[in-house]
Image: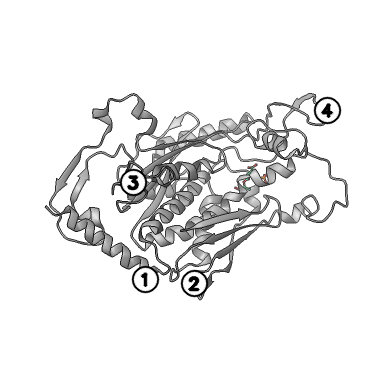
């Protein structure tokens, strides 16, 4: 089983992650992680901070000669902005008087965190609740997706909505969704909608406002049998929802048809089961035929277990709470009404959040994968996987 922790403040010296449970024998390079970190930094609507940072990972443990050893992986990402914050974010006992930040932003963790820790300087709260931390999640997710790739399982994302602009012409083929989304600076596969999304971001920026949206994560070619319906905290859909909701600013998660299921009768929601004779017994299981669906409203998960169809999950991101035209708040020192603090910020970070979404989904799928096929080395896991797929192929034979 995998587990990870992150640490580090947004304007501190560095952020870091420790990832435990990675099997031995997996090829991991800093370069691959850096590619993913770069994808997270992009996106139309990002603010000034991304002009400062060039996220690069330093792997400090768990990898030898480019291959995992089975020991915990330690990964560090330095904050370039630290140079400008050394004294304000010093770890040493306070030497100079730094004015506290006492104007909490509605929607940010500021006030809730202040009340929790009995802290009136919002800096101590916001530094850790900042989305800067998500760079670590992407580093962790890259290792997870490397593991999944060994079994031909891929994870892609696409932006479906920014503000009130919705993508309408989305290709049905995930490879096409991937190709088009990667080319778009709003990560949207519908180029007409992408244009409108950019205009909406420009408009929000002009008004000192911010925008949220919806992104979709697709897991292609997952085997059936991931997750468990017999215990509440083992259900794959529940775990994916937890992981996505843990990303900063995510307010809702849908699996497959999601909230649309509320308005449709059962006959239009549930994916009927069909059978075609398996052609061969390759390692891909479901691609060989057998039981299959013509629709995928379940988003590839039934009863908390993957059913072999692609896994489809949507997540809703709220607009970023730091507004140039700030909202009303209360000064914690004086208890007088005041405008919330204005920090440098992004106007829209939905494209970046979709890359983070890929990472946390990769982690959850890899974890469920290891739960089912787990072993200490990649060799052992490959054997376990092969045995299961052979058993599924036999199960599919009439
Ligand atoms: C964030 C505020 C901005 C964002 C930041 C998240 O940072 P700053 O306060 O330094 O301008 O750019 O996101 C990142 C630093 C990042 O790497 O994604 C916030 O308040 O959550």
Q: Residues within 10 Å of mark 1 (few under 14, many from 20)?
A: few
In the image shown, does 305 or 120 lie closer to the viewer? 305
Measured Cα–Cα span from mark 3 to mark 1? 25 Å
In the image shown, does 186 or 5 lie closer to the viewer? 5
Q: CB atoms at circles 2 and 3 under 8 Å apart?
A: no
Q: What residue is shown with label 4?
A: 334
Q: CB atoms at circles 4 and 2 under 8 Å apart?
A: no
Measured Cα–Cα span from mark 4 to mark 3? 53 Å
Q: Residues within 10 Å of mark 4 (few under 14, many from 20)?
A: few
Measured Cα–Cα span from mark 1 to mark 2? 13 Å
Question: Residue 306: percent from the left, percent from the top?
Answer: 33, 47
| Mark with earlier residue (2, 3) | 2
Disc 1 residue lies near ligand 1 with CB under 8 A: no
Q: CB atoms at circles 1 and 2 under 8 Å apart?
A: no
The answer to which image quadrant residue 240 occupies is: top left
| Mark with earlier residue (1, 4) | 4
Where disc 2 sits, the SS reads loop
Tell me the mark number nearer the camera, choosing from 4 and 3. 3
* Furthest residue toward right: 96
Where disc 1 sits, the SS reads helix
In the image shown, does 42 or 339 lie closer to the viewer? 339
| Mark with earlier residue (4, 2) | 2
Of the numbered discs in the image, which one, if any, rests on residue 379?
1
Q: What residue is shown with label 2?
A: 69
Who's the residue at 57% across and 69% down the image?
A: 61
Of the numbered discs in the image, which one, if any, rests on residue 305?
3
Question: Residue 246: percent from the left, percent from the top?
Answer: 54, 43
Q: Residues within 10 Å of mark 3 (few under 14, many from 20)?
A: many
Question: Residue 192: percent from the left, percent from the top?
Answer: 40, 36
Disc 3 residue lies near ligand 1 with CB under 8 A: no
Where disc 3 sits, the SS reads strand
Who's the residue at 67% across and 34% down the image?
A: 112
């Amino acid at each position: 089983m995998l587990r990870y922790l992150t640490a580090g403040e947004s304007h501190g010296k560095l952020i870091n992650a420790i990832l435990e449970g990675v099997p031995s024998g997996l090829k991991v390079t800093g370069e691959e992680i850096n590619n993913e970190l770069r994808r997270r930094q992009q996106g139309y609507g990002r603010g000034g901070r991304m002009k400062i940072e060039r996220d690069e990972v330093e792997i400090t443990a768990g990898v030898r000669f480019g291959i995992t050893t089975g020991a915990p992986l330690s990964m560090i990402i330095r904050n370039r902005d630290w140079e400008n914050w050394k004294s304000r974010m010093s770890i040493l006992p306070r030497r100079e008087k730094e004015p506290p930040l006492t104007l909490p932003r509605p929607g940010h963790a500021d006030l809730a965190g202040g009340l929790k820790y009995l802290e009136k300087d919002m800096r101590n709260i916001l530094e850790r609740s900042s989305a800067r931390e998500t760079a670590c999640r992407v580093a962790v997710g890259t290792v997870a997706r490397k593991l999944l790739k060994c079994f031909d399982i891929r994870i892609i994302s696409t932006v479906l909505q920014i503000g009130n602009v919705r993508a309408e012409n989305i290709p049905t083929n995930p490879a096409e969704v991937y190709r088009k989304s990667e080319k778009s600076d709003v990560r949207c596969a519908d180029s007409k909608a992408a244009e409108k999304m950019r205009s909406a971001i420009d408009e929000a920026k002009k008004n000192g406002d911010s925008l949220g949206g919806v992104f979709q994560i697709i897991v292609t070619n997952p085997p059936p049998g991931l997750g468990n319906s017999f215990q509440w905290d083992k259900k794959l859909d529940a775990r994916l929802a937890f992981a996505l909701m843990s990303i900063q600013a995510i307010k809702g998660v849908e699996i497959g048809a999601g909230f649309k299921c509320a308005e449709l009768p059962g006959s239009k929601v549930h994916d009927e089961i069909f059978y075609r004779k398996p052609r061969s017994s390759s390692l891909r299981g479901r691609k060989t035929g057998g039981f299959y669906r013509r629709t995928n409203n379940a988003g590839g998960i039934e009863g908390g277990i993957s059913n072999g169809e692609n896994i489809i999950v949507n997540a809703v991101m709220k607009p970023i709470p730091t507004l140039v035209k700030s909202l009303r708040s209360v000064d914690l020192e004086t208890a007088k009404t005041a405008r919330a603090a204005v920090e440098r910020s992004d106007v829209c970070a939905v494209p970046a959040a979709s890359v983070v979404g890929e990472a946390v989904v990769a982690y959850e799928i890899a974890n469920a994968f290891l739960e089912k096929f787990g072993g200490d080395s990649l060799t052992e896991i490959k054997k376990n996987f092969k045995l299961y797929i052979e058993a599924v192929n036999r199960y599919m034979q009439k």
